[in-house]
Image (cartoon, rainbow, N blue to C red):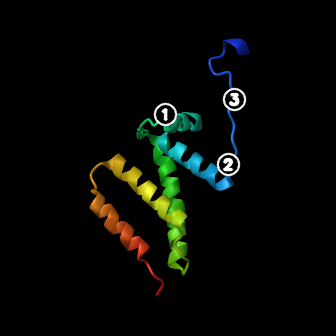
Amino acid sequence: MPCPNDRRERSVTVGFRMTPEQKRWLDRVAEESGMSKQDFIMARLRDEAIAVVPNVRVYRALREHMVELLRELRRIGAGGTVDERLHEEIERLTREFVDLRGGTGASTVNTERLDILGMRRR
C-alpha cells in the first residue's frame, strides 16, 4: 500500500526542457556513471564528485557508446568530417576509461587523440 503524499519525502516535481541531443547526452552520462538521472543531476548541482563504480551495467553502457563512436569514426574514414560534438564525446569517454583503468597516462591519451584528429581522407 503506497504511503499518502503528505508523508512522502520527495513531494515536489521539477521539470525542464532539453533538446533531443541534450537528452541523449544526459541519458548517456547518467548511464555510464551507474547513477539514475535524478542522482546524477543532483550530484552535479551540488558539485559533488561522481565516482563511477565499475559493474556490468556500466561496462555495457560504455561498450555500447564505444561501438557508436567506432561507427562514427568509420564514417569519417570513408570521407566524412570530424565535428566538435564527436571530439567532446571521444575525450569524455577516454577520460572515463582512463579513470576506470588508472594505468594510462594523459600523454598517451593526448597522443592517440591527436592521431584521431589528424586523420585525413586518402
Q: Position of residue 34 (x, y in %)?
A: 49, 39
Q: Give the SS element for disc 1.
A: loop
Choose mark 2 or mark 1, whichever is in front: 1
Identify which amino acid the numbered label 3 is placed on: Thr
Query: Label 3 crowding class (10 Å Cα cut-off): few <14, some 14-19, many 20+?
Result: few
Q: Position of residue 79 (x, y in %)?
A: 54, 81
Q: Position of residue 45 (x, y in %)?
A: 52, 37
User: Can I make out residue 24 in this image?
Assistant: yes
Choose mark 1 or mark 3, whichever is in front: 1
Q: Which residue is mark 3?
A: 13
Q: Residue at x 54, y 63 (%)?
A: 85
Identify which amino acid the numbered label 1 is placed on: Arg
In the picture, which quadrant includes the N terminus?
Answer: top right
Query: Label 1 crowding class (10 Å Cα cut-off): few <14, some 14-19, many 20+?
Result: few
Q: Give the SS element for disc 3.
A: loop
Identify which amino acid the numbered label 2 is placed on: Met
Q: Which residue is mark 1?
A: 46
Distance in Å between CA atoms under marks 1 and 3? 18 Å
73 lies above or below 34:
below
Q: Which residue is mark 2?
A: 18
Query: Label 2 crowding class (10 Å Cα cut-off): few <14, some 14-19, many 20+?
Result: few
Q: Position of residue 111 (x, y in %)?
A: 32, 68
Q: Residue at x 64, y 22 (%)?
A: 10
Q: Residue at x 41, y 50 (%)?
A: 96
Distance in Å between CA atoms under marks 2 and 3? 16 Å
39 lies above or below 33:
above
Q: Earlier in the sequence, mark 1 or mark 3?
A: 3
Q: Earlier in the sequence, mark 2 or mark 3?
A: 3
User: Can I make out residue 1 in this image?
Assistant: no
